[in-house]
Amino acid sequence: MKVHPYHTEILAEIIRKSGKATQHTFLENYLGNKHPRYPVSAPVLRQIAKEWTVKHQSLTAQEFSDVVSSLVSGKSFTEKCMGGILLDYARAPQRKFDISIFYDWLEQLEGWAEVDALCTGKFQLLEIPGNFRKWKPLLIKLSKSKEVTHRRASLVLLCSPIAHTEEDEIAAVGLSNIDRLKHEKEILITKAISWLLRSMIKHHREKVEEYIDANRDELPAIAVRETLVKLRTGKKGGVSVKPGSPSSRRS
């Protein structure tokens, strides 16, 4: 894919505020990908994204999604994550692009960290609950994909919206996707199942309790264990996690 001029502009700012792109075996194993990373903090990346979107408020939804497409196709982990960060700062009209593009975006990503950077944030909270009729087919399609990044996305895309809404249809799709994937052993899926179940507890506690009771022996053990702890204590693994903190966005 040809690099978008605005992608080049954003990357130049990332490089200006960081150092040389690096690779590190430990981080490769943890983040689940071998893409080089620029040594720049998340707050700095968010500031770059915020300032850039303010300067480019006139971009249409299609133009905005083209920039994100270019970024997620970038060579570095940092560029790919910036694509997701930009979505959080998009103006309402810029968020109205064709969401089927998520399927293509996810094909450019590797490992949980890149998927979650694209699929968990303010964008999902703002867009999915109010447009669920449009999102539902995509979420189901992703859950049936052969690609593990797609299947993880079918779960984590729902974590933020489901934690903030009482809509039964969203909860039903979340449980349906979990049910479709509950026999998988891949950690990207088992941990995402746990995260989604725990996200449902605030507004759908009874549904979660009933689902755990009926599927305890089929669900990943880690998902059962972590969800039961959250149901009992309100904490993950016995450790309190502040909503919106970095830890709360990891599954």
Image (tube, rainbow, N blue to C red):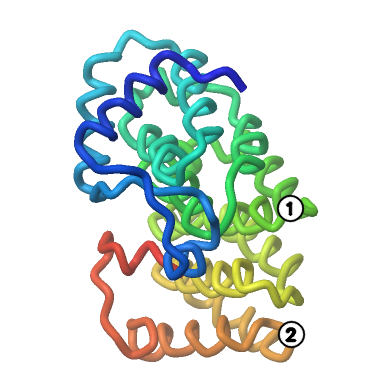
Residue 109 drawn above or below residue 99: below
Q: Quadrant of residue 123?
A: top left
The amino acid at mark 2 is: Glu
Q: CA distance from mark 1 to mark 2?
A: 22 Å
State the residue at coordinates (33%, 90%).
238
244 with respect to 228 (left or right): left
160 with respect to 190 (left or right): left
Residue with the mark numbered 2: 218
37 with respect to 44 (left or right): right
Q: Quadrant of residue 82?
A: top left
Residue toward you, 195 or 165: 195
State the residue at coordinates (61%, 43%).
106
Residue 76: where, in percent of width, then height?
Answer: 46, 42
**Mark 1 residue element:** loop
Residue 251: where, in percent of width, then height?
Answer: 46, 69
Residue 177: where, in percent of width, then height?
Answer: 69, 61
Residue 218 drawn above or below residue 243: below
Which numbered dot is residue 147?
1
Residue 203 drawn above or below residue 128: below
The single residue placed furthest to the top in the displayed view is 58
Residue 54: where, in percent of width, then height?
Answer: 22, 20
